[in-house]
Image: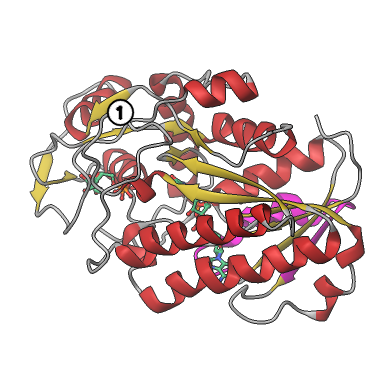
């Protein structure tokens, strides 16, 4: 897919999506440098990558000046993916100041590195820039409905600021950028204790515990299998976009949380007990991407149906649960 054979930097490359991206890039013959502070990574995500001759891991926090090992190789970078940022609400709210600075300061540092290297930078932005949307489904030109004073703001507003910085660099001709607005993604390599709905419900179902449904479970999300998301990110990175425009990367198959529970019950083969909990503050009620732009510009759309993706995810978590006893954030 990538005609250029420079060095690709993946910030956040030890995380859930980043570890799949790193694997896909290595499989395509790329050389990858992963920069990660390991704040929300699963420790074992790097195991399959670190033995690869074309993979280099540098432990660093992108809110701090980038280490010499990265800066010394600035001339080699041709692609920079910025995936660094805690993505699960309980985890990104643990240290909101750091979450905000990761998006703003961290993205700024990587944009400056892109400027210095002549590399193209892809920012992993998010559907959260649409907040609790008043327009449904969400096209890229919808400007969003974010509460800038709420507990999700450190993430949502941080990503909005990061987008703004990326487009300013591009407008000024300082760096070539791509901005992906990723919608809820799931699959193997999620942390079982990350508190997101798929990891929580899958682990609970497999452990015979009641499934925690926040609110009445009528809120919707549109879940994209990680291999599809990674394919979308790579296509976007390599696309010859003429205009400065963000691109939604997500699966338009929208379901309620209660329907998600039913989908899991159908795979597991018996009804699942529910435990209702309070809905978190500012929890978006509906979310579904319009992906016309990704289809037209990238020739991309998800190919993994929810039941297929859930089956793979269940199988992976079942293995994890046998071998791991991590704390779970529910
Ligand atoms: P994740 O938490 O598994 O991965 C993020 C990685 O970034 C982790 O390895 C973490 O240690 C690292 N990190 C965090 N702050 C850092 C910092 N300051 N310096 C260096 N490394 C840092 O999350 P994910 O689900 O893999 O998400 C990856 C990216 O995609 C994030 O930027 C997220 O905002 C975006 N995104 C993800 C989803 C999703 O559903 N997974 C949806 C929308 C957007
Ligand atoms: N949710 C839930 N049970 C859980 C975890 C989350 O019902 O154990 C809900 C949550 O309130 C939200 C949806 O599932 O409405 C998706 O939550 P997640 O944290 O995965 O992602 P986000 O809210 O960032 O889309």
Task: Name the secondary structure under disc 1.
Answer: loop
Figure check: 305 above or below 71: above
Residue position for label 1: 137
At 8% from the left and 40% from the top, the residue drawn is: 216
Between 279 and 177, the one lying in front of the other is 177
**From which residue to which does the magenta span run?**
38-58
* Residue 290 can be seen in this image: yes
Figure check: 202 above or below 32: above
- Location of residue 262 in the rendering, given as x and y in whole percent from the top left corner: 21, 25
Figure check: 129 above or below 156: above
- Location of residue 319 in the rendering, given as x and y in whole percent from the top left corner: 49, 41
At 60% from the left and 42% from the top, the residue drawn is: 244
Which quarter of the rendered picture does the C terminus lie within? Answer: bottom left
Any magenta on residue 63?
A: no
Between 246 and 122, the one lying in front of the other is 246
At 71% from the left and 32% from the top, the residue drawn is: 239
Left or right: residue 173 versus residue 309 is: right
- Location of residue 36 in the rendering, given as x and y in whole percent from the top left corner: 64, 66
Any magenta on residue 51?
A: yes
Between 166 and 254, the one lying in front of the other is 166
């Amino acid at each position: 897919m990538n005609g250029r054979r420079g060095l690709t930097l993946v910030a956040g490359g030890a995380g859930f999506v980043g570890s799949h991206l790193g694997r896909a890039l290595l499989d395509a013959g790329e050389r990858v440098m992963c920069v990660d502070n390991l704040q929300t990574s699963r420790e074992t995500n790097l195991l399959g990558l670190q033995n690869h001759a074309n993979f280099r891991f540098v432990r660093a926090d992108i809110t701090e000046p980038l280490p010499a090992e990265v800066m010394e190789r600035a001339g080699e970078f041709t692609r920079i993916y910025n995936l660094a940022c805690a993505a699960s609400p309980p985890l990104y709210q643990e240290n909101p100041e750091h979450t905000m600075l990761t998006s703003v300061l961290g993205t700024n540092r990587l944009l400056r590195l892109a400027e210095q290297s002549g590399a193209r930078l892809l920012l992993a932005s998010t559907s959260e820039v649409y907040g609790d949307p008043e327009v449904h489904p969400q096209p890229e030109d919808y400007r969003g409905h974010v509460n800038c004073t709420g507990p999700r703001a450190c993430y949502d507003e941080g990503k909005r600021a990061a987008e703004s910085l990326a487009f300013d660099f591009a407008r000024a001709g300082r760096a070539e950028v791509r901005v992906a607005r990723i919608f809820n993604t799931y699959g193997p390599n999620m942390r079982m204790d990350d508190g997101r709905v798929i990891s929580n419900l899958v682990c609970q179902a497999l452990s015979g515990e009641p499934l925690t449904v926040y609110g009445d479970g009528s809120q919707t999300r549109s879940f994209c299998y990680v291999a599809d998301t990674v394919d979308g990110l790579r296509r976007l990175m390599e696309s010859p976009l003429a205009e400065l425009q963000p691109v939604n990367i997500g699966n338009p198959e929208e379901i309620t949380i209660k329907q998600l529970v039913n989908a899991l019950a159908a795979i597991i083969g018996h009804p699942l007990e529910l435990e209702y909990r309070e809905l978190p503050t500012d929890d978006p009620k509906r979310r579904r991407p319009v992906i016309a732009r990704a289809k037209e510009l990238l020739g991309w759309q998800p190919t993994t149906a929810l039941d297929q993706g859930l089956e793979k995810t269940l199988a992976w978590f079942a293995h994890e649960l046998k071998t791991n006893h991590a704390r779970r954030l529910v």
